[in-house]
């Protein structure tokens, strides 16, 4: 009986989508059928097949272990307010959401999520015949929220068709970010169920959106879709140029990274607009060759001070003779690594 109800439920949802479709004649039923069959196969594999069950169990245990690490932190900060019998939503659920959200941000920054999304997206695109951007966003919503994923592909939005933009909206509203998974799990929902629901997001979003608003316009060919990193030097240069030449700003408080700041300083000198950085610490960041940029300023200590202080603290206060350096290979990280290495007495 449950199986019959599930099938009837799916048919009703598809019928409603068809009834409100903007263009019923151009619905690509082949694409809808492929998505539906693929979803059923995925569901059978992860629910009924032992290997799929094992995989979901491993992922569930891993995520639960990560969330438990967050619980340890919440216990340390809030004590009995977290561990006590009284359920305080803002601590027990929202605390986990904040922790997982920060972890997802780190994984995104390190490129882990981008790598996973890119290659799963390519597979989804080949199966469904969707464009690079559609596939990328549909898969990204397995991990990110409805506000995060469109921002990642913001530079492509102007070239997308109505159908592609609608898919982005559907996949966003039909998913939950990894941070929200932690919140739901804190409320008592088994992690296995949450992971199974997340696995259905890409194909389900494509299926629903392509019934309601079929692709009738010619999509622009966009290849090698990448996450839009707003801290990128090229983004900083174009943004600063617009602010100085079009918006007529009097001064700019620069972005956090040395790379983005360095890319902006020549534009500042050219347009005679002061640029102030709160955290561009690279030693020669404000230098144009042998002479300083006239309109480049910063209010933070350089890497030479920070690196020396860190090294001194390591061998004098902690008594350590060895150190492992983990840094990002960029203008923001290279300077501090160099100064720390030179000043550490090993």
Image: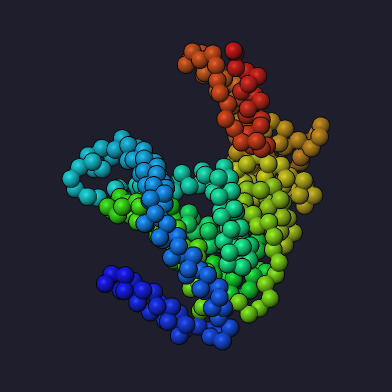
User: Is residue 80 depicted above or below 88 in this figure?
Assistant: above
Instruction: Name the residue: 63% across, 80% down.
Output: 216
In the rendered image, the vertical position of residue 49 relative to residue 20, given as above or below: above
Q: 130 or 336, which lies in front? A: 130
Where does residue 292 sit, x and y in percent of width and height? 77, 36
| Residue 193 picture location, percent across and down | 35, 56
> Which is nearer the eye, 131 or 313?
131
What is the quadrant of residue 303 in the picture? top right
Relative to 331, 270 lies left or right: right
State the count of labels: 0
Identify the image quadrant of residue 11. Answer: bottom left
Q: Look at the image and tell me in which quarter the N terminus lies.
A: bottom left
Residue shown at the point (54%, 67%) measured from the top left: 168
Q: Position of residue 54 (x, y in %)?
A: 39, 47
- Visible residue check, residue 105: yes
> Whole-percent x and y of residue 335?
66, 30
Residue at far right of view: 290
| Residue under the image location 36 percent in, 43 percent down | 61
**Quadrant of residue 7 within the rendered picture:** bottom left
Is the C terminus in the top left, top right, bottom left or bottom right quadrant? Answer: top right
At x 63% / y 27%, what residue is drawn? 337
What colour-coding does the image apply? rainbow
For the question of whether residue 90 can be seen, the reply is no
């Amino acid at each position: 009986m449950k199986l019959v109800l599930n099938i009837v439920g799916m048919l009703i949802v598809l019928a409603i989508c068809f009834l409100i479709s903007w263009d019923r004649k151009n619905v690509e039923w082949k694409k809808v059928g492929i998505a539906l069959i693929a979803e059923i196969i995925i569901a059978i594999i992860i629910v009924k097949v032992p290997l799929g069950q094992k995989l979901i169990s491993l992922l569930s245990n891993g995520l639960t272990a990560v969330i438990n690490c967050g619980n340890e932190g919440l216990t340390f900060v809030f004590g009995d307010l977290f561990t006590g019998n009284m359920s305080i939503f803002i601590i027990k659920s929202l605390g986990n959401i904040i922790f997982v959200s920060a972890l997802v941000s780190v994984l995104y920054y390190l490129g882990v999520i981008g790598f996973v999304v890119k290659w799963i997206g390519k597979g989804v695109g080949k199966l469904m015949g969707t464009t690079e951007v559609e596939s990328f966003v549909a898969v990204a919503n397995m991990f990110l929220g409805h506000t995060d994923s469109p921002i990642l592909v913001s530079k492509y939005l102007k070239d997308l068709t109505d159908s592609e933009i609608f898919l982005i909206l559907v996949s966003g509203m039909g998913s939950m970010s990894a941070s929200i998974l932690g919140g739901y799990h804190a409320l008592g929902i088994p992690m296995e169920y949450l992971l199974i629901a997340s696995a259905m997001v890409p194909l389900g979003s494509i299926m629903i959106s392509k019934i309601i608003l079929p692709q009738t316009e010619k999509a622009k060919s966009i290849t090698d879709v990448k996450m839009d990193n707003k801290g990128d030097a090229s983004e900083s240069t174009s943004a600063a140029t617009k602010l100085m030449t079009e918006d007529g700003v009097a001064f700019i408080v620069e972005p956090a990274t040395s790379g983005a700041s360095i890319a902006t300083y020549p534009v500042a000198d050219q347009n005679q607009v002061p640029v102030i950085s709160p955290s561009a610490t690279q030693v020669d960041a404000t230098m144009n060759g042998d002479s300083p940029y006239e309109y480049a300023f910063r209010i933070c200590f350089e890497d030479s001070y920070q690196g020396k202080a860190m090294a001194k603290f390591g061998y004098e206060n902690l008594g350590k003779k060895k150190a492992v350096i983990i840094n990002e290979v960029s203008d923001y990280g290279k300077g501090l690594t160099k100064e720390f290495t030179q000043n550490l007495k090993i």
